[in-house]
Amino acid sequence: MSLSELTLTQAREKLKKRECSAVELTRALLERIDRLEPQIGAYINVFPERALAQAERADQRLARGEEGLLTGIPLAVKDVISTRGLPTTCASRMLARYRPPYDAAVITRLEEEGYVLLGKANLDEFAMGSSTENSALQTTRNPWDKEAVPGGSSGGSAAAVAAAECLGALGSDTGGSVRQPAAHCGVVGLKPTYGRVSRFGLVAYASSLDQIGPLSKTVADSALLLQAIAGHDFRDSTSAPRAVPDYLKELERGVRGLRLGLPREYFIKEGMDSEVEAAVRGAVKHLEGLGAECLEISLPHTPYAIAVYYIIAMAEASSNLARYDGVKYGFREAESRGLLEMYQKTRSQGFGPEVIRRIMLGTYVLSAGYYDAYYRKASQVRTLIIRDFQEAFEKVDLLLTPVAPTPAFRQGEKTADPLQMYLTDIFTISANLAGIPGIALPCGFSAGGLPIGFQILGNYFEEVRLLQAARAFEQATDYHLRRPNL
Ligand code: GLN
């Protein structure tokens, strides 16, 4: 097996036993990146020299026997997470040449654990989208089928993991952007509980929904990455001052005796691909076979989730993106007469069409005349969605659902109709509205050879249980072992 094909857990073992060095491992991945990037386009920027220097330091650390959780492990990071002195573009013209003067909290943590940063991964501009097609900088292709999208917005991170162009990656999930691309690329994606991971240095899209999460080949790798990045941070006042459990130690507990709820509203026929439904039902059967008890439950406010999400996300986005005005940092259109024209030209040329659409709609729903009708109403319905979950978790331990209604769609298939694109988020956005954790993992393939994933949702801070159930499923199946032919 070549080094790039290793799981993160296997690579860690090899490094520990000195069966390979961090430099060798990093070289193997850089070579694979060189070979595959022309077809995949997962990375916006790759940092070969820097990565090799980091790997050398990791080898020294390993030699001293002082390794951390990720010493010498080469990773990709979504380009919406700030890296000091390195481009952090958000896949936008607005920040194409921006280099932050500080590291995101998760980057500091990864550094402490000794990781190697291979490069920054492509995304939908400012993480707004479900296919990575809104990137203003480049196209990312699905490693399983180059005509298909990788999903989004963390499509670069998911494609890089699936194509073995890194051993794991970080993404961000505002409405499904870790879980959905993970499902479309046949890898594991975890959105932690809101507040579990610091958002300090994550470029804000919708602050009450955003959360950073890992993408990886296996559930154990996901647990390891979460272990490295979770925890309180005084610089993010919404991060939770709660102890971080040992995710790896508790991983093997299985699902025997757990009650799994199947939300009726997530198994609707309309718009749902029959292969996806069959694969998810298959996963349910499997978990029952492993000793879980499955029962149907209801999350009655699910039909309102898309409308609520897009009002709240756009409102918050319009406020968060006001900072890109050509004055403070980022792109500025120099050919302007006066301040107002400079603002107008900078913002209309710096942002792509989807970002502009969201800023305009977000401004509208927050405006004095419409605030009550849209933003306030959406916030009220959000509370009802939260209650749905609270009631469900009184009856069951975990929820089991599809991740997306279809496997990855074709490049260009939905770009002309934003509403069609928004509708594909139906199964992932409620977890963000409620702030609960969710994990997506592979459970099948379409006849066309595209991966299909399913989702496990848990109550607040129950990542341990989520990972246990996902691990039990993964151990009993071999979907995660299949790799695209590249
Ligand atoms: N597709 C959703 C959106 O466009 C979610 C994106 C995300 O999670 N960042 O807002």
Image (cartoon, grey):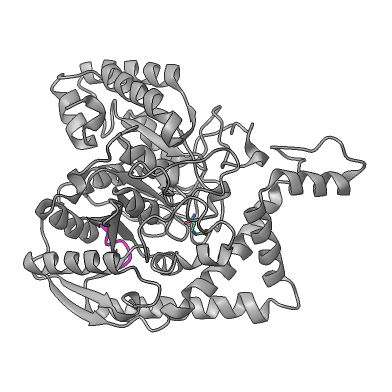
Residue numbers of the magenta segment: 457-463
Q: Position of residue 446 (x, y in %)?
A: 27, 57
Q: Residue at x 34, y 75 (%)?
A: 266
Residue 399 falls in image quadrant:
bottom left
Q: Is residue 173 above or below residue 27?
A: below
Q: Position of residue 367 (x, y in %)?
A: 73, 71
Residue 116 falls in image quadrant:
top left
Q: Is residue 243 above or below residue 268?
A: above
Residue 408 falls in image quadrant:
bottom left
Q: How many marks?
A: 0
Horizontal relation, residue 119 to residue 73: left or right = right
Q: Is residue 482 above or below residue 447?
A: above
Q: Is residue 291 visible?
A: no
Q: Is residue 197 visible?
A: yes
Horizontal relation, residue 12 to residue 176: left or right = left
Q: Residue at x 20, y 30 (%)?
A: 12
| Image quadrant containing the N terminus | top left
* In magenta segment, residue 311: no
